[in-house]
Image: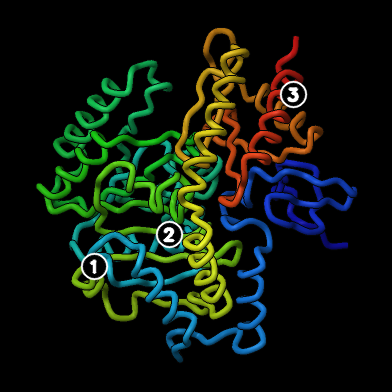
Amino acid sequence: MSHLSEHLRQATPVVAERGEGVHLFGTDGRRYLDFTAGIGVTSTGHCHPKVVAAAQEQVATLIHGQYTTVMHRPLQRLVERLGQVLPEGLDSLFFANSGSEAVEAALRLARQATGRPNVVVCQGGFHGRTVAAASMTTSGTKVRTGFGPLMGGVVITPFPHAFHYGWDEETATRFALREFDQLLQTVSDPDDTAAIFIEPVLGEGGYVPANSAFLQGLRERADRHGILLVLDEIQTGVGRTGRFWGHDHFDVRPDILITAKGLASGFPLSGIAASEELMRKARPGSQGGTYGGNAVACAAAVATLDVVEEENLVDNAAAMGARLRAGLDEVAAKNPAIGDVRGLGLMLASEFVTETGEPDPGAATRVMGAAVEEGLLLLPCGPWGNVVRMIPPLIVDAGAIDEGLRAWSAAVAAGTAG
């Protein structure tokens, strides 16, 4: 009898039967408040009527029009639609299926465009599970262990994670920029460095936001040395942080932007955006793929972008994120097991620590289990699995936020008792 790999472990015991808005309904007959959104994917909620209608119409018309064989209208419409929200100057697009594929496409473009072999990534970053993307990932060893040697040419620089270092943000930022300068003098000469890859908010690494001084410092150094700045917006993009793109908080411009997750409300779709001048430097034949830019996924993405605009979901993410953050801070103030609350918009997390300040994954696991009993679905992150994240759909309203906070408060009390 066949079965799923034992390594595909679920964070909750729920078997989902259907989804609607901010809720999942299990085969156990219970309704669950979904603050995971499929790891930030169901941005418009489960089965938004406009996304469903767009996908159904497309399925009945053209399911697969392979985009290096023929062109199709959903892909053309998506290019036009993204052109309205992408940073100025990023006017050339390539589409794939997953975040990992998009990361590797960005890596390939950066190396081909600059003729340089090395890339710099930040400590704690997550960029994917395929070989090159995993080689660039340092959010946890589980992504990298057991299939080395990994891809060469990857250099790691610190991220200004103030809570981890026990410093204030200004000190952590000065340290991180100083170490980056040291790296260029000791490990990867600028003439060998093609690009810097960075998430505006560390995702799997613990939901740690960057800051303006750090990202602008990297931008200045990239400009000075002819290095490309690549912003991995796979999890932070399409309104998740309360701005359309996560980097919009920090007044910095990317050379290459990577997007996926919330772009198509659950359909597999990813992409990279760059200037036409930069994209032209990719080698002929270096971009492609059988399923990339699938017609149904593109139709769903166009509908997603329409819903995000029509329902003001970026502003809603900012407002509901502020409401959620205030509630998380209130719970943390009453429980010393929560050492830090952080994030942006509807991308928030609470870090659990012991009495001596060490990571406490056991507490995080107990709290998430207790949350399921309260009807709230959550996910862990961070290198030790001691960070519990909340990423509800962008359509979440005040009632659902308050319901989630009541469940969270009860789960924290139950999971940290004794």
The answer to which of marks 2 and 1 sits earlier in the sequence is 2
Q: Residue at x 23, y 73 (%)?
A: 276
Question: Disc 1 vs disc 3: which is toward the camera?
Answer: 3
Question: Disc 2 vs disc 3: which is toward the camera?
Answer: 3
Under mark 1, the amino acid is Ser
Q: Residue 18 appears at what percent x and percent y?
A: 78, 59
Mark 2 and mark 3: Cα distance apart in space: 35 Å
Element under label 3? helix
Q: Which residue is mark 3?
A: 410
The answer to which of marks 1 and 3 sits earlier in the sequence is 1
Assess disc 1: are there few (<14), some (14-19) or many (≥20) residues with their C-alpha within 10 Å of its C-alpha. some
Q: Reply above or below: 345 against 127.
A: above
Q: Residue at x 52, y 12 (%)?
A: 357
Instruction: Give the quadrant of the N terminus.
Output: bottom right
Q: Residue at x 65, y 63 (%)?
A: 48
Under mark 3, the amino acid is Ala
Can I make out residue 398 in this image?
yes
Q: Which residue is mark 1?
A: 275
Residue 259 badge? 2
Nearest to the observer: residue 119 or residue 202: 202
Nearest to the observer: residue 403 or residue 74: 403
Q: Residue 61 appears at what percent x and percent y?
A: 62, 89
Assess disc 3: are there few (<14), some (14-19) or many (≥20) residues with their C-alpha within 10 Å of its C-alpha. some
Element under label 1? loop
Instruction: Give the quadrant of the C terminus.
Output: top right
Q: Reply above or below: 50 against 394.
A: below
* Number of dots carrying numbers: 3
Nearest to the observer: residue 363 or residue 9: 363
